[in-house]
Image (cartoon, rainbow, N blue to C red):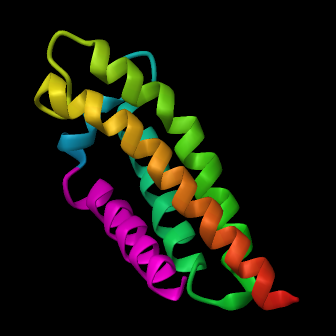
Amino acid sequence: MPILKIIFAIFFMYAGIMHFVKPAFFKHFIPNKFPKLTVNYIVGIIEFLLGLGLFPQSTTSYAAIGIFILLVALLPIHIWDATKERPAIGFKIIAYIRIPLQFLLMYGAYLIYQDSLLIIL
């Protein structure tokens, strides 16, 4: 499972950095009732730190749980985006495909968590 952990770590760190590099891309994912830039930066920091947290063995299980929780928390945003006339992700088909992908990512976070427990034992 180390390769999955590395892939997730790089993916989430990259996604976190992109919240700072291209904040305009993410603003359309955030409902108007929220302070878009603030939410964007907070999510970016969380994603980066959770990805980074997958590297040390001592924090892997916590980071995996955090990633799982983050993915669950962001799922309504992806569903909301898919139901919009013009999804922020671009095309409706991509917005709908992204929903089951979110569950796949949750499963990956779960596998990383399970693997981190086996190493402790």
Question: Which quadrant holds the N terminus?
Answer: bottom right
Q: Which residues are magenta?
A: 1-22
**Is 19 part of what is drawn in magenta?**
yes
Look at 72% across and 71% down and name the residue there.
114
Q: Position of residue 115 (x, y in %)?
A: 68, 78
Q: Position of residue 41 (x, y in %)?
A: 41, 51
Question: Which quadrant holds the C terminus?
Answer: bottom right
- Is residue 27 depicted above or below 45 in this figure? above
Q: How many marks?
A: 0
Q: Position of residue 29 (x, y in %)?
A: 31, 31
Q: Quadrant of residue 24?
A: top left
Q: Position of residue 6 (x, y in %)?
A: 44, 83
Left or right for 102, reference 113:
left
Look at 53% across and 45% down and name the residue there.
71
Magenta stretch, main secondary structure class? helix
Single out the residue that lies furthest toward the right: 121
Q: Is residue 31 visible?
A: no
Look at 28% across and 27% down and name the residue there.
96
Q: Quadrant of residue 91?
A: top left
Look at 19% across and 53% down and name the residue there.
22
Q: Is residue 106 visible?
A: yes
Left or right for 1, reference 62:
left
